């Protein structure tokens, strides 16, 4: 009788151990197509970046995908994105920094709207560039160690932007030391190389790219129209970083 009880306790202990081990393995994220030659954040204390989200304009995302898109649909209700952690002192170093674009005469708005701190989905809060492949570029003014780049195109409705590519470089012309930190251009229609990341619906959360401490001065964000029209809207780009050592 005593032996049977001990055996039962051992089985229960083993089951509890297995359950713990299982929980630990579920935290790993999937590959997001990040091809940057970057380094992991240093082992110091990590804290949530001071990211403030604009108000949501709709809830949930469509069950039916727009034709020709490649979006990973979440099973069950859409959960808020987990807070992103980086070394203490990381802040948005793109705020009020100068912006240039492939189209210096936007259809709507002015390029300074991209780093003015406003990212609400309201009229006059975005810049709209013409059809096809376009880019906007922020000059951070110095080299930074970049932990995250967050971009908002426009989030008044859940549209999908095409060929979303985020690159960083040391020169304003993006000729040398160009690194792609995100790309979902899986058929290279933008001509910048193949990207493996998923497409996504625009929401108030914006698109956060883990840059893993890549060092650069210039940030460039590409797009190639969206599922509602061929135009390219941008309302804000934030770059969470520390001065590069
Ligand atoms: Ca803005
Ligand atoms: Ca494409």
Image: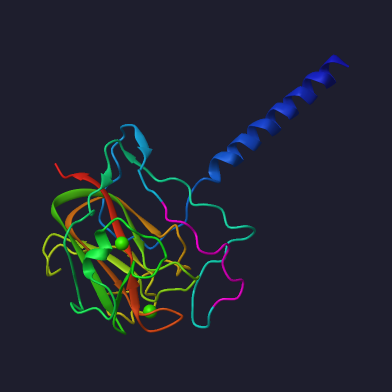
Quarter of the image for the N terminus: give it: top right
77 and 185: which is toward the camera = 77
Q: Is residue 48 above or below residue 102?
A: above
Q: Nearer the viewer, residue 112 or 243?
A: 112
Q: Residue at x 40, y 46 (%)?
A: 84
Q: Position of residue 178 (x, y in %)?
A: 18, 64
Indicate whether residue 26 is drawn in magenta: no
211 lies above or below 135: above
Ligand 1 location (quadrant) = bottom left
Q: Check the image and name the residue furthest to the front.
A: 123
Find the magenta span and give its range. Answer: 53-65
Q: Position of residue 57 (x, y in %)?
A: 50, 63
Quarter of the image where the C terminus is located: top left
In which image quadrant can residue 176 be found?
bottom left
Relative to 234, is 217 on the left or the right? left
Q: Main secondary structure of the magenta part?
A: loop
Q: Nearer the viewer, residue 69 or 15?
A: 69
* Relative horizontal placement of residue 87, taking residue 123 as reference (left or right): left
Q: Residue at x 45, y 81 (%)?
A: 228
- The answer to which image quadrant residue 216 occupies is bottom left
The residue closer to the viewer here, 14 or 230, is 230
Q: How many marks?
A: 0
Residue 230: x and y, percent? 37, 84
Is 193 located above or below residue 213 in the figure?
Answer: below
């Amino acid at each position: 009788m005593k032996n049977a009880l001990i055996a039962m306790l051992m089985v229960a202990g083993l089951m509890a151990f297995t359950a713990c081990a299982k929980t630990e393995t579920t935290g790993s994220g999937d590959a997001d197509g990040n091809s940057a030659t970057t380094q992991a954040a240093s082992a110091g204390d990590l804290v949530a970046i001071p990211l403030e989200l604009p108000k949501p304009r709709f809830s949930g995302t469509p069950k039916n995908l727009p034709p020709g898109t490649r979006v990973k649909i979440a099973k069950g209700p859409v959960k808020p994105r987990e807070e992103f952690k980086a070394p203490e002192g990381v802040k948005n170093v793109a705020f009020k920094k100068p912006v240039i674009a492939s189209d210096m005469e936007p259809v709507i708005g002015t390029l300074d709207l991209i780093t003015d701190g406003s990212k609400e989905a309201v009229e006059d809060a975005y810049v709209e560039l013409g059809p096809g492949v376009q880019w906007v570029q922020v000059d951070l003014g110095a080299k930074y160690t970049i932990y995250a780049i967050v971009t908002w195109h426009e989030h008044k409705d859940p549209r999908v932007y095409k060929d979303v590519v985020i690159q960083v470089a040391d020169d304003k012309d993006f000729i040398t030391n160009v690194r792609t930190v995100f790309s979902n251009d899986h058929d290279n229609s933008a001509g910048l190389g193949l990207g493996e990341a998923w497409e996504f619906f625009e929401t108030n959360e914006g698109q956060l790219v883990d840059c893993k401490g890549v060092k650069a001065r210039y940030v460039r964000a590409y797009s190639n129209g969206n599922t509602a029209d061929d135009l390219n809207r941008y309302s804000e780009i934030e770059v969470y970083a520390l001065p590069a050592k």
